[in-house]
Image (spheres, grey):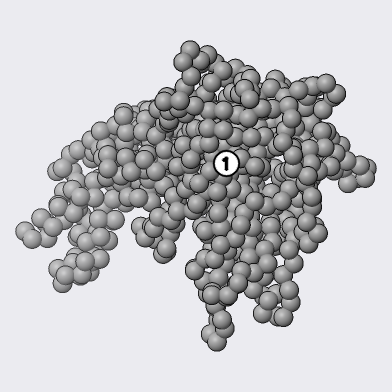
Amino acid sequence: MAAPMLRGRCLGRCWALACIDSGSRHGRGAATGFTSSGKRGQSFVAQQPLLTAQKSRKGEHKWAAVVGLEIHAQIASNSKLFSGSQVHFAAPPNSLVSFFDASLPGTLPVLNRRCVEAAVMTGLALNCHINKKSLFDRKHYFYADLPAGYQITQQRLPIAVNGSLAYSVCVGKKWRQVITKTVRIKQIQLEQDSGKSLHDELRSQTLIDLNRAGVGLLEVVLEPDMSCGEEAATAVRELQLILQALGTSQANMAEGQLRVDANISVHHPGEPLGVRTEVKNLNSARFLARAIDYEIQRQINELENGCEILNETRSFDYKLGCTVPMRDKEGKQDYRFMPEPNLPPLLLYDTASLPAGADPQQVINIDRIREQLPELPSETREKLIQQYGILPEHSFALLNEVGLLEFFQNVIKETRAEPKKVTSWVLNIFLGFLKQRNLAVNESPVTPSVLAELLNLLDRKVISSAAAKQVFEELWRSKGKTPSQIVSERKLELMQDEEALERVCHAVMEGHPQVVMDMKRGNPRAINKLIGLVRKVTHNRADPTVIKEILEKQLSS
């Protein structure tokens, strides 16, 4: 059978990074204050035993937790998976709906080439085997936001299988104690998204928005190789960074572009696995970690109190910090999977198997996509450590914040300051100001050029560290001014007249004889106190190193 016709690729890549602490909820019966509904269905994750045990109180048996994830990432494409409708977040309701999206009779699916390429690229980046032949299926279930009564997915033979995702977790209180773990990837499949059901509680009615219906999704199924919320959240964050680096998904959890279902059970090591529950539609890494850890402890408490764990679907109420039941799964739903009759098998090729004279617009070459793979986050972190000599935890911080790495690299290009000093300023002072004001990096009034100029002044010892911080604060308030202008206006330059500084040091020593005596007796804190007093007199315009040298010289004379 011939390969399906492919629509043309969309132009450009989407590189926006994600905010992961808040956002919209996707899924029927959401319990986090949001009322949109969407994807439903059975879990594809098969549980495997895990040896990591939860901490137990003295005299109690240890419990082992088993956690697997199903992650749905919205593909970054200009149009939907099987129709030409545009993909745009927050468009007016039902303004981006084609006849096919609305499931009108006589309409047929046309596969989006961009979505297939995104799936192949993601599979390659995640060390998957790419199936040269994959199949589409219909998964039947009935809900108002699924007009056709079925979802087109890849249940029998997905596009990518048997991959792995490496992620790093903290094993102590300091990020310097980092270990790398790997979670297996069972499969990656292409499928349609559903629409949204918007529940109006005041009017007791449900409204349907089909803008999202038919948007292409990548479902990434992670094997249950994790044992706690921290591991799961870290793995999801790493996948998020990979998708963003590839440009295959914006993965913005706040906009529902990355949604996670967690499958959780507990058991005693060496005993059969416990009954699994599924927590649906988690829309932030923080909520994911909290939901999993709560559910693990809830199941342990239930079992220790003689109760049974129900095979059910639950949702996470972020206000209460707990999971709540949605529906039970004891009676297994029959999705009546069947081959999609309107889509032939999807055939992919590598360089060796590419048919002679094939139209490049109608075939997808796996090897060519492999050549286009960009630098992945793990490689970027390693390069930062090697190139700039920064700590591993700093490399994670630079990548985890949206746009921060680019900001850092632009500062490095324009300053003579040491990379470690730049790192300290970017992560501690610059990022701290952003957090206090709840701003993104691209909203900062301080540009990389301005920060580089400030660090150059500090590096040339024109100003002290304390003065540099004052200038930085003023830069946030006085947009348009340069660091040099602020230094000149506020007279923050370091004292260059060493004789005048010697007189100040002498006067301070004469005015504090007891501190001088303590210093002579070898009290290390005494000289620091004198340095502080001199800096106070000079309004922080004296270099602490120079002050210390003068004080030690005068003390020995």
Under mark 1, the amino acid is Ile
Taking the view exactly as shown, the residue that stands out farthest to the front is 1
The vertical placement of 101 against 276, above or below, is above
Which residue appears at 52% of the width and 58% of the height? 225
Q: Nearer the viewer, residue 352 or 234?
A: 352
The vertical placement of 356 against 300, above or below, is above
Which residue appears at 10% of the width and 55% of the height? 553
Where is the C terminus found, in terms of image quarters?
Answer: bottom left
The vertical placement of 337 against 549, above or below, is above
Displayed quadrant of residue 138: top right
Where is the N terminus found, in terms of image quarters?
Answer: top right
x and y percent of residue 459 in the render?
25, 37
Taking the view exactly as shown, the residue that stands out farthest to the right is 203
x and y percent of residue 238 in the render?
49, 46
Which residue appears at 53% of the width and 43% of the height? 161
> Is any atom of residue 429 visible in this view?
no
x and y percent of residue 272 in the render?
60, 72
The 10 Å Cα crowd at callout 1, few under 14, some 14 to 19, many 20 or more, is many
Instruction: Say left or right for 221 vs 493.
Output: right
The kind of secondary structure element at disc 1 is strand
Residue picked out by circle 1? 188
Displayed quadrant of residue 136: top right
Instruction: Say left or right for 59 vs 379.
Output: right
Q: Nearer the viewer, residue 293 or 122?
A: 122
Instruction: Say left or right for 70 vs 498.
Output: right
Q: How many marks?
A: 1
Which residue appears at 83% of the width and 21% of the height? 106
Taking the view exactly as shown, the residue that stands out farthest to the left is 557
> Is any atom of residue 415 visible in this view?
yes
